[in-house]
Image (spheres, rainbow, N blue to C red):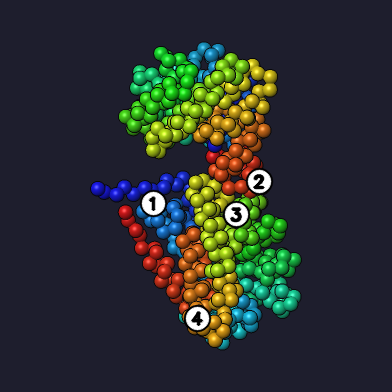
């Protein structure tokens, strides 16, 4: 299970202030802390308030790589910002993300191949928005899979996100996302990987951590490979570690939960 | 229509471990032996590389093996009276690639040898042969916790393979290996979960991963061999899929377990249908060994020279690359 640590994001107050003042402390702190907790990737999002998005991405990538060598997930809707980050990444990066719109695929997939990067492909397009049912999501996922083949992006480097919505906004979506995860694994051989932005499920809910860790376990049972998540939520990591053992993906030992946080899966 | 060969994709390899040290590296061995490194299930060279072949260590005791089957004693002969001459004969006459020295006489009931006497035995064996050495104690923790550190210190730099570290007793032997630059055997009682846990515990002490060999325990033919095979295979599959705490080469005491079997020892006079004991015993050990080879064992610890010869032939044949 790959955990993409979500904390280095300009939407968080301490990171926003770090970006505005140039004080590296908070960025260093979260880079190290998430890595120590076993994050496979560190998400890097400049946030909306940064004036110069490209310069901010460059600063964040350099600042993170001063203290850790964890691979980065470059998170932006602006592909110039992503490419600026890709040029600096010491290890192959993850592009977060690309919609299933053709014109976006034509920009992002060749960019991924050029920089040996992986891609999060969203099972939605500008036209469809977030589809209501699993079938529509799977149809868009299939377009992403076909495009990966077309542009020479290895399928195991494509992470498809079925999209999950807050449980207090669209309660009927979670089961559709779960069904989508199951079906994605039948789209190709080898199948693409799967990912979700986990914390979205509990936006503005009362007990967010409980919902998040219940959700990750249920999604893992449906074929989830990765989650953009709070790598500082140790209960969440323990739940994911336990799910791996229960699903027989990891050989049990008494220290399995510690091992999950210490290793990078 | 052409048959499409399905190949498993593995994300990890077994760690390569070097046994012994030559003069340049602070030891006295004439050569070192490398084990591990496989990137697929055993002998599937079309699927992944297998850079190092499984090797055979012959078992040597520091006392006369009174209880061993007469057939083995006859095959090895008078040299059994002394560990150094016994080891020398195993290497020179029987082609042993490693010597597995069991310091059994440290057992209070089998000689009560002191740590100093054990050190001398190890030094004598080192002087008699040029191959790397595996040294284990008598199996009693309190005793082994004295003799293994003494051996480790006296033979610093030799990169001995020392054992054994167990879940409930690992600190002393692991620390001795780390301080004096040796490799350690972690031991688990036919339990993959304890095997993994023990590897985590010793790794947490800071010993590098290329200094660990695992002994998951084995059962001989007819006495749990298939269970040993399953554990080996499960561990190997886990290791190949990325479980670093199981990605270590494996050692197994084949001779000890195979010769425990009644079927290896009783004479044809008692069971005429079973055939001659001499041949049967050898085959019992050889079949136990060759089965474990298919599970992924890297170091076979064996007793009978004829069984060693059969298994060496088997290994050579299996190592011929198969291309599909």
Q: Nearer the viewer, mark 4 or mark 2?
A: 4
Numbered label attached to residue B273:
4
Indicate whether B65 appears above or below A31.
Answer: below
Tell me the SS state at disc 4: helix
Residue B90 in view: no
- Residue at position x 52%, y 28% from top? A178
Return the x and y of residue A46 as percentages of the image width and height: 53, 19
Return the x and y of residue B138 as percentages of the image width and height: 68, 71
Question: Which chain is indicated by disc 3?
Answer: B
Which residue in the protein does label 2 denote?
A255
Q: Nearer the viewer, mark 3 or mark 1?
A: 3
Q: Quadrant of the C terminus of chain A?
A: top right
Question: Which chain is indicated by disc 2?
Answer: A
Left or right side of A3 for A254: right
Marks 4 & 1 on one chain: yes
Mark 3 and mark 1 lie on one chain; the one further toward the N terminus is: 1
Tell me the SS state at disc 1: loop
Residue nearest the observer in this picture, B320 or A144: A144
Residue nearest the observer in this picture, B174 or A157: A157
Marks 2 & 3 on one chain: no
Marks 3 & 4 on one chain: yes
């Amino acid at each position: 299970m790959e955990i993409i640590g979500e904390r280095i994001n300009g939407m968080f107050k301490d990171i926003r202030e770090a970006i505005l003042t140039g004080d590296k402390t908070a960025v260093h702190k979260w880079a190290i802390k998430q890595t120590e907790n076993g994050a496979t990737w560190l998400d890097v999002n400049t946030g909306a308030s940064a004036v110069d998005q490209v310069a901010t991405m460059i600063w964040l990538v350099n600042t993170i790589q001063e203290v850790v060598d964890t691979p980065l997930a470059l998170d932006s809707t602006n592909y110039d910002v992503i490419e600026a980050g890709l040029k600096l990444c010491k290890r192959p990066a993850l592009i977060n993300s690309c919609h299933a719109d053709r014109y976006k695929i034509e920009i992002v997939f060749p960019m991924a191949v050029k920089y040996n990067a992986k891609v999060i492909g969203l099972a939605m397009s500008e036209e469809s928005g977030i589809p209501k049912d699993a079938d529509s999501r799977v149809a868009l996922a299939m377009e992403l899979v076909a495009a990966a083949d077309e542009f020479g992006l290895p399928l195991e480097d494509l992470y498809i996100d079925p999209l999950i919505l807050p449980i207090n906004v669209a309660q009927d979506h979670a089961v559709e996302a779960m069904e989508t995860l199951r079906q994605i694994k039948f789209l190709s051989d080898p199948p693409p990987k799967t990912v979700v932005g986990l914390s979205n499920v509990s936006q503005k809910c009362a007990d967010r951590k409980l919902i998040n860790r219940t959700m990750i376990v249920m999604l893992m049972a449906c074929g989830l490979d990765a989650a953009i998540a709070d790598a500082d939520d140790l209960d969440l990591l323990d739940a994911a570690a336990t799910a791996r053992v229960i699903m027989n993906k990891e050989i049990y030992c008494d220290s399995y939960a510690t091992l999950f946080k210490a290793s990078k899966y | 229509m052409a048959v499409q060969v399905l190949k498993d994709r593995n994300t990890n390899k077994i760690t390569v471990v070097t046994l012994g040290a030559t003069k340049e590296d602070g030891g006295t061995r004439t050569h070192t032996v490398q084990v591990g490194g496989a990137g697929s299930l055993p002998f599937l060279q079309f699927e992944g590389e297998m850079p190092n072949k499984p090797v055979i260590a012959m078992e040597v005791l520091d006392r006369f093996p009174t209880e061993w089957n007469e057939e083995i004693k006859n095959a090895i002969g008078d040299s059994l009276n002394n560990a150094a001459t016994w080891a020398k004969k195993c290497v020179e006459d029987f082609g042993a690639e490693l010597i597995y020295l069991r310091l059994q006489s440290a057992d209070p009931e089998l000689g009560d040898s002191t740590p100093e006497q054990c050190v001398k035995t190890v030094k004598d064996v080192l002087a008699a042969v040029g191959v790397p050495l595996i040294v284990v104690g008598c199996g009693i923790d309190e005793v082994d916790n004295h003799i293994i550190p003494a051996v480790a210190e006296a033979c610093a730099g030799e990169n001995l393979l020392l054992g054994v570290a167990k879940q409930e007793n690992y600190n002393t032997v692991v620390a001795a290996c780390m301080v004096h630059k040796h490799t350690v055997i972690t031991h688990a009682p036919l339990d993959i979960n304890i095997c993994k846990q023990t590897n985590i515990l010793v790794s947490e002490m800071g010993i590098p991963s290329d200094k660990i060999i695992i002994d998951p325990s084995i059962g001989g033919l007819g006495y749990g061999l298939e269970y040993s095979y399953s554990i080996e295979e499960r561990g190997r599959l886990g290791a190949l899929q990325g479980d670093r705490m199981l990605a270590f080469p494996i050692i197994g005491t084949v001779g000890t377990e195979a010769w425990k079997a009644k079927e290896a020892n009783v004479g044809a006079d008692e069971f005429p249908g079973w055939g001659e004991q001499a041949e049967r015993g050898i085959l019992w050990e050889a079949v136990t060994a060759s089965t474990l080879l298919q599970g992924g064992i890297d170091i076979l610890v064996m007793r009978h020279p004829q069984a060693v010869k059969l298994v060496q032939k088997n290994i050579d044949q299996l190592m011929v690359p198969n291309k599909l």
